[in-house]
Image (cartoon, helix red, strand yellow):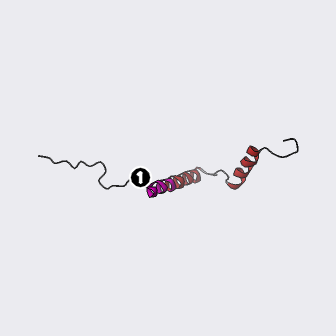
Amino acid sequence: MADGRQEPAEVLGDIIATTAPAPTTQEETHTQLEDKVVRQTIREFSKGGMYFAYSFGRCFGVYI
């Protein structure tokens, strides 16, 4: 901007870079991704968006 202030997108980028730095190792990246997947799975399961069954895929027909 003309008066020396940054654009909102630049400010947001700076905030994200300082508060959530990129993972340093590949193991850390995988750990963060796994945590996100587990959190989302728990969230969906607790909302009723997923169903759990021990007998998934079994056939319960009567055989003669």
**Side of 16 relative to 61 (left or right):** right
Q: Amino acid at mark 1?
A: Met
Instruction: Determine the residue positioned at 69% across, 51% down.
Output: 16
Q: Main secondary structure of the magenta part?
A: helix
Q: Element under label 1? A: loop
Where residue 45 sits: x, y (%)? 44, 55
The residue lying furthest to the top in this view is 2
Q: Work out whether residue 44 or residue 17 is closer to the camera in this orientation and state it.
A: 44
Crowd class of label 1 (few under 14; some 14 to 19; many from 20; radius 10 Å): few
For this rendering, which residue is in front, 49 or 14? 49
Determine the residue positioned at 29% across, 53% down: 55
Q: Residue furthest left?
A: 64
Residue at image location 52% in from the left, 53% down from the top: 34
- x, y percent for residue 41: 47, 54
* Residue 25 shown in magenta: no
Looking at the image, residue 62 sits to the left or right of residue 47; the answer is left
Total marks placed:
1
Give the magenta-colored segment's residue range. Answer: 39-50
Q: Position of residue 32 (x, y in %)?
A: 57, 54
- Residue 47 among magenta residues: yes
Q: Residue furthest right?
A: 3
Residue plotted at (31% across, 51% down) = 56
Apparent side of residue 18 relative to residue 5 in the rendered image (left or right): left
Horizontal and vertical percent position of residue 7: 78, 43
Nearest the viewer among 29 and 63 is 63
Quadrant of the drawing holding the N terminus: top right
Instruction: Determine which residue is flagged by label 1.
Output: 50
